Amino acid sequence: MTKLRCLGIENTDIDSGLEYLSESCKKFRCNSDDGYESAKFENELSRYSLGEGSKRYYNLERWRENKQNDLAVSIISPERLFVIRSNLNQFINKWGEKKDDNLIELSKLQSPDELRKKYLWKIYTTRFIGSGAAVAGAVLTFQDQSAIGGGILAVYPFTDLIVSKLEKKLEIGENRWKEFLTDANDFLDNFNGLLGMLGQFEFNKLKGGTINRAIKNLDKEVDKFLKIYDENKDKEIDINELTEKRDKLVEDIIKGKGGEAKSKAWEIIDSIKELEKAVIEYHRTSYYGTNRSNVEKSDTKQIKSYHTIDFNKYSEEKDNKQPQIEIPPKS
């Protein structure tokens, strides 16, 4: 059976079992009159008919591919892909933004421990100097050295102002870190959700076809990213793993969208977009048929009743919007 290339049946009561044919079988011929169960094959395979008259046959290779595509689109929602892509995009755009100093926001970020090491000793030292100046100035003033004592006392308000500014910088830095953690958790929720979606596929069984190729490519890019940050090898990335390797994330984001050393994060985003395109196009061709001219001849009411996704509309959304993306409910 592994060398079978073509199979033909005629007027039988067999109505199923095509999936058990070996993949070497590319062509299937069926000629069944009404009343025979085998006529069901002609209905199921009508989209894959090639040739005419006695030379007519059904393309089993295309049929197998679409069977897998049907399974894929039942798992993958283009709306969900769009939300994941948009949220990943928002994170990269926000923390990869460059200011006047040409540094991305993420590279300037400091953890609370780093901030305390930077500012606390300055705050304590300045307070100590201010307190010492206040005591020394007061003592000298009472010892009839008011000119010197007054000069030293004048230092105290300046030290108090410096401490206030340092504390404000510390507070801003800590709030910025909290903001990053919130955004990073959203980023990881979407990334790990993508892992869960891909985890439903048996990749060794995925064959050809645009959707399957897009799924495989996305899985490859996700796996590259996962290997960098998944320290405990549990097939997920948690917030501690991401923050501990923050320098790696900075290096990756700096690479940007183009060039030979393209950012792995951007590779994932682009791969999601390609899978979106493949799924949406499959929905279109599955409903309208592969011949686009048939669409123009379709009944107008039938077209209006079918909910399609306008990929171009999705693509025109600005990926760097800060609010969370919400997909409106289907009408």
Image (tube, rainbow, N blue to C red):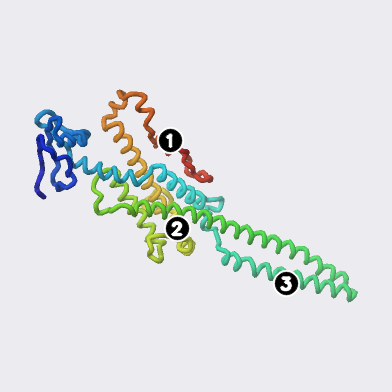
Give me the residue at 55% from left, 50% from top.
99
Quadrant of the rendered structure where residue 179 is? bottom right
The answer to whether residue 156 is left or right of residue 217 is right
Residue that numbered label 2 is attached to:
251
Q: Secondary structure at mark 3?
A: helix
Q: Residue at x 43, y 50 (%)?
A: 256
The residue where tag 1 is placed is 313
The tag earlier along the polypeptide, 1 or 3, is 3
| Residues marked 1 and 2 touching at CB (< 8 Å) | no
Task: Determine the secondary structure under disc 1.
Answer: helix
Image location (x, y in percent) of residue 330:
44, 36
Query: Given this view, does label 1 or label 2 mark the residue nearer the observer?
Result: 1
91 left or right of 121 in image: left
Placement of 78 over or under 102, stated as above or below:
above
Q: Residue at x 41, y 53 (%)?
A: 193
Q: Which of the two marks, 1 or 3, is nearer to us in this view?
A: 1
Classify 10 Å Cα crowding around label 2: few (below 14), some (14-19), many (20 and above): few
Which residue, given by chain and number where applicable, does mark 3 sit on?
128
Q: Position of residue 79 (x, y in %)?
A: 41, 42
Q: Amino acid at mark 1?
A: Lys
Q: Amino acid at mark 2?
A: Glu
Q: Nearer the viewer, residue 243 or 233?
A: 233
Could you tell me the amino acid type at mark 3?
A: Phe
The residue closer to the viewer here, 284 or 270, is 284
Q: Say if 162 sits above or below 46 in the image.
A: below
